[in-house]
Image (tube, rainbow, N blue to C red):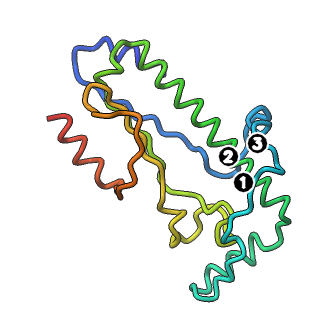
Amino acid sequence: VDALPDLANSDQPWALYVGTFGPHDPFKVPTHYLDMYDLDDIPIPQNYSDTLTDKPAVYRRMREQYWGQLSETEIRDAIRHYWAYCTMMDDLFGLVLDALDATGQADNTMVLRVSDHGEYLGNHGLFFKGVPAFREAYHIPAIIRYPAVIESPNRTMDEFVSLADFAPTFYDVAG
C-alpha cells in the first residue's frame, strides 16, 4: 500500500503484486472478526457426511486420520474461523483499493483479486485442500476492477475462467 503513491506519480506504466498468505491455515484472526459470526448460525455442509466410498481411498484415509474425530461444534468453529479470516482479507484488500483511489489512478488501473485454490471447509468431511479433486478446491473467486474499461460493472458472471486466462488478458490490456 505504501508503494502506491510512488507508482502513481511515475510517468511509466506500473504493476504491483500483493501476495497474501491468507486465508490458509491456521485460521487465526483477531477476535472482532470471529465475533461477526455466531457459531450457532454456521451450517454444516450438506455433503459433510459423504461416505466417499465411490472415491479413491486416499480421501477416506485423510478424513478418518485428520478430521473424523472433530465434533459438530469443532467443525462449525473451523468454518467460522475461515469465514472470519476471509472477512479480514476482504478488509485488507479494501485498504489497497482505498490507497489506489487516493492516487487518482483507480479508473485507469486494472485490479485483479484471485485465490490460488479453494478450501474444502468440511465438504465431503474434508478440510484444507488436501489432494485436490472436488469442485471446492477449484472453485475460486475472481474479482476484477477496471472502471475505464469494464462495461456494466458490479455484476456477477458464472462463466468458467481459468487462472491461465489472465496472462493473455494482461498482455491484451498492456497492448
Disc 3 or 1, which lies upstream in sequence?
A: 3
* Residue pointed to by mark 2: 83
* Percent position of residue 144, x then y: 38, 38
Tell me which numbered mark, 3 or 2, is placed earlier along the sequence: 3
Q: Is residue 156 left or right of residue 110?
A: right
| Percent x, y of residue 137 | 52, 63
Left or right: residue 172 compared with residue 107: left
For the C terminus, give its image quadrant: top left
Residue type highlighted by circle 1: Ile
Q: Are marks 3 and 2 in contact (CB under 8 Å)?
A: yes
Q: Is residue 137 above or below residue 32?
A: below
Residue 173 location, quadrant = top left
Residue nearest the viewer, comparing 12 with 73: 73
Q: Position of residue 14 (x, y in %)?
A: 28, 25
Camera-side mark, 3 or 2:
3
Residue position for label 3: 37
Q: Secondary structure at mark 1?
A: helix
The residue at 70%/42% (across/down) is 84
User: Real-space Cα distance between discs 3 and 2?
Assistant: 8 Å
149 in relation to 158, above or below: above
Helix or strand or loop: what does disc 2 sit on? helix
The type of residue carrying mark 3 is Tyr
Query: Residue 79: which numbered mark, if any?
Result: 1
* Label 1 close to label 2 by CB (< 8 Å): yes
Q: Quadrant of residue 74?
A: bottom right
Q: In the image, is residue 138 above or below residue 17?
A: below
Q: Of 151 and 63, which appears nearest the observer?
A: 151
Amino acid type of disc 2?
Trp
